[in-house]
Amino acid sequence: MSTPRLNRALVLETAQDVPDGAGGFDRMWMPQGTIWADVSARSGRATRGAAAPVSVTAYRMIVRAAPMGDPARPAAGQRFREGPRVWRIEAVAERDPGARHLICFTEEELTP
């Protein structure tokens, strides 16, 4: 297994619901920190969005492992951000038996 090239700085974000002042909630994305990743595209497809066609691309992102429960450990339901680009984290798995790296399976949606 080759050593991953952790050459992309991504911001790990967690969703937080905050009161909107009208009895409901707004979803805010709070940064948890910067994580370096090896990013590679896997597959893509076109689908129908609510208002326009949407391009969905799956990515595999390899990051350094962090212990379970550590806020630096990515989890499904969180997301990565790099400037205006956003990737939803769908699943996370250990990459190697020594648990030195994690694989984050993510998706990015783009509206043309």
Image (spheres, rainbow, N blue to C red):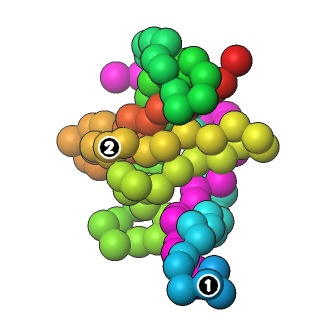
> From the viewer's perspective, is 91 left or right of 109?
left
Element on which disc 2 rests: strand
Magenta segment:
1-19
Q: Can residue 14 be spotted in the picture?
A: yes
Residue type of the residue flagged with mark 2: Ala
Q: Which residue is mark 2?
A: 91
Q: Which residue is mark 1?
A: 22
Residue 112 placement: quadrant: top right
Residue type of the residue flagged with mark 1: Ala
> From the viewer's perspective, is 46 left or right of 1?
right
Q: The N terminus lies in which quarter of the figure?
A: top left
Nearer mark to the viewer, of 1 and 2: 1
Q: Residues within 10 Å of mark 1 (few under 14, many from 20)?
A: few
Above or below, 60 against 88 in this view is above
Main secondary structure found in the magenta portion: strand
The residue depicted at 58 percent of the width and 56 percent of the height is: 12
Tell me the distance, in whole angstroms, between the alpha carbons under discs 1 and 2: 34 Å
Q: Residues within 10 Å of mark 2 (few under 14, many from 20)?
A: some
Horizontal and vertical percent for residue 3? Answer: 47, 29
Horizontal and vertical percent for residue 87? Answer: 55, 39
Does the segment drawn in magenta span residue 13? yes
Does the segment drawn in magenta span residue 12? yes
Q: Can residue 3 be spotted in the picture?
A: no
Q: Decide which of tag 1 and tag 2 comes sooner along the chain.
A: 1
Horizontal and vertical percent for residue 45? Answer: 45, 12
> From the viewer's perspective, is 104 left or right of 112?
left
The residue depicted at 52 percent of the width and 65 percent of the height is: 15
Above or below, 89 against 39 in this view is below
Instruction: Pick whichever, 23 or 103, lies toward us.
Output: 23
Above or below, 55 against 77 in this view is above
The residue depicted at 32 percent of the width and 43 percent of the height is: 91
Element on which disc 1 rests: loop
